[in-house]
Image (cartoon, rainbow, N blue to C red):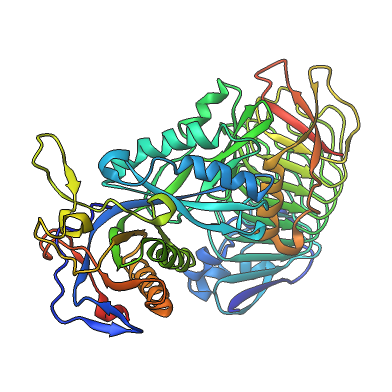
Amino acid sequence: MSGLTLRLKAPAHQRLNIAALTPANLAKLSSHDIAHLKVGMDKEALAVGDAFDISGTPGDTLTIEGQGAALDFAGAGLCSGTLIVNGNVGGYAARRMTGGRLEIHGHAGNYLGSGATGGMIHVSGNAGDNLGGIISGDRFGMSGGTVVVGGNIGARAGDKMRRGTVIVKGNTGVGTGTRMLGGTIWAEGHLGPDPGFMMRRGTLIAQRVERLLPTFADCGEHDLVILQILSKYLRDTLGGLAPKPLGKFAHKIGGDLATLGKGEILLPV
Amino acid sequence: MSQAPQTATPSKPMTVNGVTIDDTFAEAFGMSGTGIIITADTLKWARIAADVATGFGTSVIGCGAECGIDRELTPDETPDGRPGVRVLMFGFSPDALIPQVKNRVGQCVLTSPGSACYAGLDAATKIGLGQGPRFFGDGNQTAKKLGDKRYWRVPVMDGEFVIEETTGITTDAVGGGNLLIIGRDRAGLLETTEAAVAAIAKVNDVITPFPGGIVRSGSKVGSKYKGMFASTNDAFCPTLRGVTQSELQAGTIAVLEIVIDGLTSKAVAVAMRAGLKAVTTIGTVKGVTRVSAGNYGGKLGPHHYHLKDLI
């Protein structure tokens, strides 16, 4: 595994926008140019060389040792290769990511995977609000790719999400799948209150739901082939990160009937 | 293509285990081929759906497509972890095959209890698989995209019919690989030919589209009657041996043909070799005397499979 390592020199006194720090971007730059890339967000922005010790050579993998920093936009625009962040990241990690792999060994802030269309995102800890959600100016939220969060996630995950898969090992916050248009959010724990608000299509899976909206209707217990396909697909693509395969039957709750109503909440039985 | 032999002239025959192998070749044609996977709750129901979907699929001349079951699949080999079968379909062109796939899946797989249908060929060129049948959902159908595959979920009376949006198609397929098995005992000849079909069934990427894999009515191109594209291959009809320009020697009672379609030319050759080996292993004990192959003098089909190269 060839690659570059950026190790934070000291806790940064300003937030850092590290969108430019992807393996593909850095592979095109000389070490001088890398050191002079601006990453600080203040008026006198820090450069990479000011904030980080640089070692290794640019390659397929970039490792950022960032404990103590406020790193926003980690892996934003990532299209190939692997970006590993050891430490927490701030907002907008994997923003508009199209491919490659983002490994965050820590927690992630809000809007993780917003606008992403491909690639694999793994957060070992928790993630904040609006995971895979839409931001102002975008037409959709997450539109592809896979996110695996080892802990819990915040509110309104998948807001206007169109495609892709989100796996949450813990629980989700309020309003999971708000305005969802497609894709899958699978929580191995439970869904917070009011999931699927104004959801048109898409699938939410969890062991239980804290509180259902009145515009969701019970469709009964069913043997759904698509769940076997989903379980097998995730096992094949995620290996050890895949959720525990679902049983044969699931309780289907359809909605949101306040809108198109082709979404579903599936509770394994 | 299952248009059977026009000529099969032996020149320097060889003998294997008492069976004469003509020094001739099978002449085959380029075709378009596609594959689908049919699964169900049990292998029995997957096979029922596959048998119906491949029915009336013997020859492109009259059926629109040549269809058959390639092999059974274990749960590990299917997208939904259920037992299944892989079906292959062959046609003159992608345009000719597309409606065949749509109609056969729509009428025979969608309707079969517990069934689901997936792409059975990974190829760069795709054709619609669920693009037509999904509309049976009347607006209640939903899609689920996983990776680069999109699955349609069509509500039906026993739950959901899941069907993948597309499957692959190849224009490098070959139709019309063949063996002509000739004998002096009709029952024994059938038994030997069945053994050859069973051996061919173990080869991947090929089908033998005729009933039980065997053709008793090999045809020649054209007819004395206007509008007939093919007619009986009189040179290989035993009852005409004395009154037509026959290819059969004295004592011949029957000729059975195995027609082989494959996704690749190599697969067809492997299948012919397997069939030939099965016949020569049994030898003459059941009345088989000779193996030949059908061709058109090498002028029509680009794929030539010489029997002497397959022994």
Nearer the observer, B129 or B74:
B74
Position of residue A76 measured from the top left corner of the image (x, y, whole percent) = 60, 52
Q: Vertically, is A76 above or below A156?
A: below
Q: x, y percentage for residue B154? A: 60, 30
Give the camera-side residue of B113 and A81: B113
Q: How many marks?
A: 0
**Residue that protrudes farthest toward the right in the picture:** A210
x%, y% of residue B224? 8, 41
Tell me if I can see residue B88 in this picture: no
Q: Is residue B217 above or below residue B260?
A: above
Q: Position of residue A232 (x, y in %)?
A: 68, 54
The quarter holding residue A192 reads: top right
B213 vs A84: above or below: above
**Horizontal side of residue B249 vs B254, given as left or right:** left
Q: Residue at x 31, y 60 (%)?
A: B257
B276 displayed left or right of A239: left
Q: Give the residue at x 40% y 64%.
A: B193
Q: At 69% from the left edge and 30% from the top edge, which residue is drawn?
A: B158
Of residue A177 and residue B37, the one placed in the foreground of this image is: B37
Outermost residue toward the top?
A258
Would you say residue B283 is visible in this rendering?
yes
- In the figure, is residue A163 to the left or right of B303? right
In what quadrant of the picture does the C terminus of chain B appear? Answer: bottom left
Identified at 53% across, 75% down, the residue is: A31
